[in-house]
Image: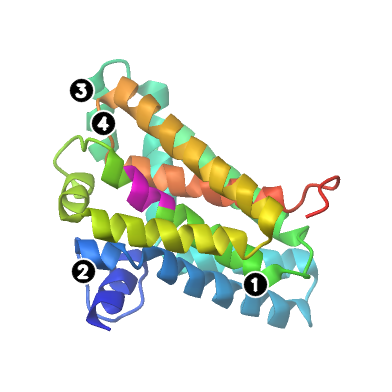
Amino acid sequence: MRTLLSAISFLTIVPVGRTSVPSGRAAALFPLVGAILGAAGAGIYLAAGSVLPSSIAALLVVTFWSAISGVLHEDGLADVADALRAGRSQAKMLAILKDSRIGTFGAVAIVLSIVARWQAVEHLSTDRLFEVFIAAQAVPRAAIVALAWVSRPVGTGLGLAFSSTLNTTAAVAAIVQGIAAAFACGLRPGLVIVLGAYLAIRFAQAYFYKRIGGVNGDCLGATEQILEIFILILFTCRNCSW
């Protein structure tokens, strides 16, 4: 229970005691925390959707996910957008990543992320709402554990501290949970989600290695956001008979 509370403390603003850097054992439960958030989001959508337009219900879900996580991943996405756009040298890009201020490109990235998820949630079918929401929250969190596990950390911030706590057991446990969440949506969509997550991890690792020499906490947050958007949009495809 203490390990789960540590994971919840790190990934959310739920007052269960603050954890600045989760242990490797806590990282193994990141997908479980994501599954809890996904299930809660589905409950919010169904409850709100019974009395409000679907667009408002969808916006409430995305707002809940962002707020409950303390916009942790959105902040990483914004920092990466600012750094990769404005940075010329590796040193300058790392300096931008450390800067707590959000620039124009970071702000645009956050807005696009919110709008993409909002519209995707609004147009999802309610047939497998719980499964899709759980996958959208669990798989990206499993992916960032995997990315941190296989990557070289850069800088001296959260990414380094987080990566140093990881071990094979924790990483494999997180990956297995992520795969299970993906296939809970069905065989074919599960295969697409797992393949998409794998490609995202490999691409992110190669890209961030080339641009900043490794992976830090902001890179993990950006990867989480991109995968979350991918999974939600996947289930809005009109010609895909999942």
Q: CA distance from mark 4 to mark 2?
A: 24 Å
CB atoms of marks 3 and 2 within 8 Å: no
- The residue lying at 29 percent from left, 62 percent from top is 27
Q: Earlier in the sequence, mark 3 or mark 4?
A: 3
Give the camera-side residue of 183 and 53: 183
Q: Main secondary structure of the magenta part?
A: helix
Determine whether 161 is above or below 135 in the image. above
Closer to the N terminus: mark 1 or mark 4?
A: 1
- Name the secondary structure under disc 1: helix
Q: Is residue 21 left or right of residue 14?
A: left
Q: Would you say the residues marked 4 and 2 are in contact, meaning their CB atoms lie under 8 Å apart?
A: no
> Which sits earlier in the primary sequence, circle 3 or circle 2?
2
Q: Nearer the viewer, residue 6 or 50?
A: 6
Identify the residue position indicated by label 4 in the image. 214
Q: Quadrant of residue 132?
A: bottom right
Closer to the camera: disc 3 or disc 2? 2
Quarter of the image that includes the N terminus: bottom left
Query: x%, y% of residue 87?
Result: 33, 21
Residue matched to label 1? 130
Whichever of labels 3 and 1 marks the residue nearer the N terminus, that label is 3
Secondary structure at badge 2 equals loop
Query: Does residue 102 appear in the picture of this structure?
Result: no
Q: Measured from the top left, where is residue 148 in percent x and y?
A: 29, 45
The answer to whether marks 3 and 4 mark residues whose Cβ atoms lie closer than 8 Å is no
Residue type pointed to by label 4:
Gly
Query: Against 143, is 181 above or below?
Result: below
Which quadrant of the figure has residue 21? bottom left
The kind of residue on which mark 3 rests is: Ala
- Identified at 55% across, 48% down, the residue is 194
